[in-house]
Amino acid sequence: MYCFFFLFVLINIATVTANYLHAVPSVPFSSDNRQSFRLRSLKHIVVDSSFADEVNTNGSTLIPPTLWEFASTFQLDVKNELGLQLRLAIGKNPAPDAIFLTLDKNQVFKDAAGILTSEGYSLTVDRNGIVIAGASPLGAWWGTRSIMQLAQLYDCRLPCGSGTDAPGWRTRGIMLDAGRHYYPPDFIIELCSYLSFFKQNELHLHVSDNLFINLEQTAASEIMNTYGSFRLSSDNPALNGLGGPQNESYTHDQFEAIQQRCAKRGVSVIPEIEAPAHALAITRWKPELALSSDPTMLNVSHPGTLPLLREIWGTFLPWFHSKEVHIGADEYSADHIPDYVKYVNELSSFIQETSSKRTRIWGTFTPSQGSTVSKDITIQHWAPYSDNAYHDFIANGYETINSDYMFYMVGKWSPYFGQRLNKTLIFSADPLGGPFAPHIFDAANATNNPPRDNPFVVGHISPFWSDWGPTATTFLEAYYSWRDSLPALADKQWGGSLLETEYDSIIDTLRYIIPDQNLDRRVESRTALVLKYPLNKSHVGKVIKDHSGNNYHGILKGDCNAGENGLYFAGKCHLDTPLHSLGRNYTLSFEVKPTSSGPATLFAGADSTLMSQTAQSELVTIISGSHPYAINYTLPLNRWIRVELAGRGESTFLKVSTVPVTDDKRQVTQEFEFLTRIDTHGVQAGSNYTTVWRPMAFEAPLARIGEGFKGYFRQIVVRKNQ
Ligand SMILES: *[C@@H]1O[C@H](CO)[C@@H](O)[C@H](O)[C@H]1NC(C)=O
Ligand SMILES: *[C@@H]1O[C@H](CO)[C@@H](O)[C@H](O)[C@H]1NC(C)=O
Ligand SMILES: *[C@@H]1O[C@H](CO)[C@@H](O)[C@H](O)[C@H]1NC(C)=O
Ligand SMILES: *[C@@H]1O[C@H](CO)[C@@H](O)[C@H](O)[C@H]1NC(C)=O
Ligand SMILES: *[C@@H]1O[C@H](CO)[C@@H](O)[C@H](O)[C@H]1NC(C)=O
Ligand SMILES: *[C@@H]1O[C@H](CO)[C@@H](O)[C@H](O)[C@H]1NC(C)=O
Ligand SMILES: *[C@@H]1O[C@H](CO)[C@@H](O)[C@H](O)[C@H]1NC(C)=O
Ligand SMILES: *[C@@H]1O[C@H](CO)[C@@H](O)[C@H](O)[C@H]1NC(C)=O
Ligand SMILES: *[C@@H]1O[C@H](CO)[C@@H](O)[C@H](O)[C@H]1NC(C)=O
């Protein structure tokens, strides 16, 4: 929404009914409802000169922005998303028609356990302007997120009044399994922007892993060829042979950029290097360190294992800007618990001594099983069958992060876990009544949940696992697992009060202004018609005019000729559009007549490519994340075919129809769906099937048309369908 437009219909009257404003998370606020402040009259963002250079040293990042830096990001957001051009200034006091950003060192902001938090802020609105006073610059930043959301939801008119807000828990976020699937750096940065808008502060990035291997059914040679990765690539010669796949690893520069861009919006990247289990990327490189009983696990009692892990961590610790790192340590062989404990403690001490960072591990073995890992280690509980978070860890004085599998997802398919967050559960998980909160580990049995103010519950992380490897999902499908309900979970991780009906009524409106990301791959369009290139004779020139009304004119590169009521691509030209990619739901239709076979691109975009043929196959194929997904169809030569690529929810279809011509009046139509084959390695208990087929959702590729293609194109039309 643009705040400078007058709105005659006020959808949300700025009324405070409960003791909070509707935003995600909810914003505690009290108001007499008599007066309001119009954001249209804003002229400045004023940063308190006493605190402009201050940073928050209490958060989870070592690269915290200053109050001034947060303010300049806010200034850009307000311009880009609300259309308000505000001047950024330094000042001593709140000014008229300004948002004053300051710190309040006297106010005490407390979390759910009554412990001081640096992430709180207070918000005051009066007829002159707005004051946000943070416990720290990070607290003030979260206050700016409230302003962004309230502007959108309350028609740029905030009720006068005030409120004090603070998160109940210090760890709030998601985990992304980048070990079994590559996620490009830009995608991770966009995810951070998404989290930040809802005041989530951590992105836990799992950077090494391998696919599950059923040892009984798998030959030794096959095990070594199973997909496994280590995504950090360093030039330390001692680690030569570890990184990879080479082109799908993060360089130091890329990892630095990810961390900096996330920190800029208050989000810390918590890296996880997984060992001693899930460590095929390491054991393939150093087979002598593998456990004889399981080649994907490191033998923790082998004298070479700990020194190698010290070398690895010693190499990468200087890359990491978080105060805590994750060493994995889950699903190890229960035959070696004492050695496991020794390994975990020694590695954790090494990390502490070299970098002053704390360590996290997944909940694995319990103290009653003899796992007496140091209490300096934070436990990230996930499986109620391996531990009872409350009785095994919290009651024994371990700081514990809740990643219970009630909000745990596996991409695309799983016999056990969901593919989406369960919104109903988010609003109802407390067995005593009420919504989820990080201290709820069991939605059925209250005995397993510590009190809300237990100080050993440090927060909640919702994991997404790429169990079926790189081909099962596109990287954007991981986002869609979270998209609809992660903001609701963010409200609960913060300790917010939103009701499900309130959430449902505001979330889609908020999606339009989430800054610094376009995960939905939206394209601005005046109507549902996004792009139209008729490409018939009369319109051919260097510039291809867009007839949609959006002026997305294309540019021809190389030699293309008009002819036969279509544009002829001789394999030496292509058409560039100003667009990149279009997200769900869309139809991309065109007519095409290939005159020669061979690999060629029909449409290429930022997230996918539609090929008429590839080097490997004559079938029509979509390439995504460098993986081919073919349908059982080959475009015939020398015949006009009408093609419609349709993204419908979680599926992508291709419909082809022959275009009737004088000597052949038939019109044959066929529809195909793009699917992925998941090899389950016999995971499904009690059943024999080994593969499942699941739909793929691809974004429409729109950037470049016809590269390498020989033949004709016409009537290119792109529509969005809601
Ligand atoms: C920040 O950390 C310092 C040093 O540990 C501590 O004294 C202070 O109370 C903390 N402040 C907040 C707001 O958490
Ligand atoms: C682990 O390594 C030790 C020391 O080399 C060796 O004695 C032991 O047999 C190994 N254990 C397994 C299960 O591979
Ligand atoms: C979501 O959670 C609710 C409440 O626990 C439950 O009844 C429902 O079956 C769950 N839905 C799915 C799809 O798992
Ligand atoms: C609830 O949990 C407690 C503690 O783990 C257990 O003893 C009890 O049997 C459980 N109750 C039910 C109904 O499952
Ligand atoms: C070309 O397409 C435009 C727009 O669809 C149409 O108005 C025009 O008649 C077409 N011209 C030819 C020669 O087909
Ligand atoms: C990475 O390299 C592999 C093997 O050469 C190739 O198949 C894949 O397309 C490449 N991936 C990217 C993202 O370039
Ligand atoms: C693919 O299509 C051809 C003919 O169009 C058909 O003979 C063949 O059985 C199909 N293959 C599969 C796997 O469906
Ligand atoms: C896309 O369409 C599906 C139905 O096919 C619908 O469930 C979904 O909400 C739509 N998505 C968007 C982003 O409009
Ligand atoms: C699985 O396959 C085995 C042998 O191939 C057969 O004996 C068994 O009955 C099958 N089980 C099921 C549940 O189909």
Image: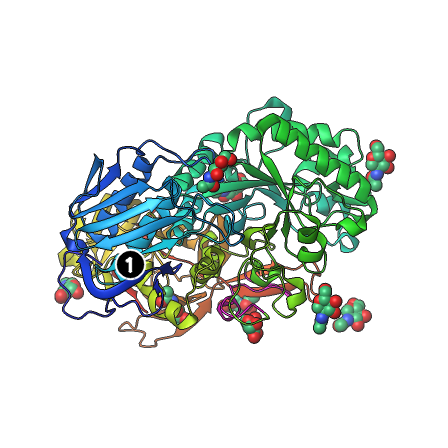
Q: Along the horizontal axis of the image, is 450 left or right of 611?
A: right
Mark 1 crowdedness (10 Å alpha carbons): few <14, some 14-19, many ≥20: many
Q: Secondary structure at mark 1?
A: helix
In the rendered structure, which amino acid carries the disc numbered 1?
Answer: Leu
* Residue 613 horizontal/vertical position (percent): 44, 54
Expressed as whole percent of the image width and height from the top left, the position of residue 392 reads: 72, 54
Q: In this image, 431 relative to 256: left or right?
A: right
Whether residue 644 is visible, yes or no, is: no
Taking the spot 30% from the left edge, 41% from the top edge, the residue there is: 102
Highlighted magenta segment, given as a residue range: 412-430
Magenta highlight on residue 480? no
Residue at figure coordinates x 25%, y 52% from the top left: 81
* Along the viewing direction, whichever of 487 and 610 lies nearer the viewer: 487
Judge whether residue 422 is colored magenta.
Answer: yes
Q: Is residue 144 left or right of residue 167?
A: left
State the image coordinates of residue 174 (x, y, percent, origin top left): 51, 52
Q: Residue at x 37, y 63 (%)?
A: 584
Q: Which residue is mark 1?
A: 150
Q: Main secondary structure of the magenta part?
A: loop
Quadrant in the picture for the C terminus: bottom left
Q: Position of residue 310 (x, y in %)?
A: 67, 29
Q: Give the image quarter of residue 697.
A: bottom left
In front here: 173 or 316?
173
